[in-house]
Amino acid sequence: MKDFSCFGESSVQIGDAASSSSSSLSATHGGNGGRKGAGQNQVSCLYQARLSGQACVISVTWSKGLSVSVDDACGKCLCKADAKPWLFSKKKGSKSLAAGDGKIGIFWDLSGAKFGPGPEPLEGFYVAVMFNREMVLLLGDMKKDAYRKMGGAVRPALSTLFLARKEHIHGKKLYCAKAQFCDNGRCHDIVIECDSIGLKDPCLEIRIDKKPVMQVKRLAWKFRGNQTIIVDGLPVEVFWDVHSWLFSSTTSNAVFMFQTCPDPDMSMPWNPWMYSHIFRESQLQGLSFSLILYAWKIE
């Protein structure tokens, strides 16, 4: 079995960084709705960009609000902004800080945002990061409004990369998410099915767009592993760790990772307890796109 401790070797490039996938279909907007055993509903997206030729990492997190952070390649925070959409004064705003030989600006407008079942808005919003007069990252469907807000001539970003997405999903035996695995590719429906309660031989099945792409039998013996599937004609490596579902006496989550594979023969070390560290360390250049799902059982 392959292992991993870092992401792969080439990223999905995005033009002006439009939001690529919606949040969990099964989660409750704004939190766990008081359900026992459900983790907090949260989605984090990680992007790699350049400020005056220097690599930086932009993280956008939705969880009962919005948090945007711009870090340099060493992990030092250059600029951070937090917004709480339920507070009228925070539905739109901006924050700017001097960084190096320029100024980083973070802008957002959630005043007309429409939400689905998850914490991410579906439409009617923008989130933008600008460095001097360059639009480094732009999310949402209100792009014209964002450029109007910036004022004057703003150059679009040319090399922003979508590195990773981390999401908490909830269910009893079905766990749903959406993802776009390649640039300009279609958005796929992902369903993970696993009923482990009271079964002597539980089975794990993953379906993409209702089509079964992977099945793991004898799950008690194969609670961690990996398998390659094909999506949009490209190999995607799927890693799973369902140990806590099967053997933990307390409510906890399983973890699934979908990673595009530019090199199907590449070997990646695995450490099931290092997902958060992996996610933050993925600012290394030349990475594949990774989707990490924390699946929480609802009792």
Image (spheres, grey):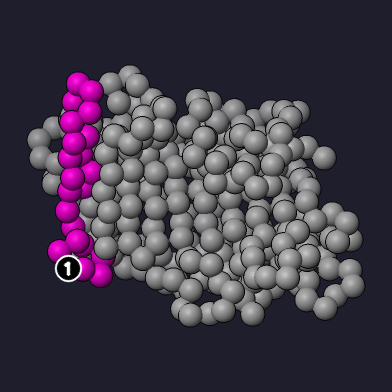
User: Can you say which quadrant of the picture contains the N terminus?
Assistant: top right
Q: Amino acid at mark 1?
A: Phe
Estimate the x, y position of residue 9 in percent, counting from the top left: 59, 28
Q: Is residue 51 left or right of residue 226?
A: left
Vertical side of 168 occupied by 1: above or below: above
| Count of labels in the image | 1
Q: Residues within 10 Å of mark 1 (few under 14, many from 20)?
A: few
The quarter holding residue 103 reads top left
Numbered range of the magenta stretch: 85-107
Residue 42: image location, x then y, percent: 46, 60
Residue 176 drawn above or below residue 53? below
Residue 145 on image: x %, y %: 18, 51
Q: Is residue 86 a member of the stretch shown in magenta?
A: yes
Q: At x 32% / y 47%, what residue is drawn?
A: 68
Indicate left or right for 87 with 41 as reference.
Answer: left
- Please name the residue shown 61% across and 34% down the image: 6
Can I make out residue 217 in this image?
A: no
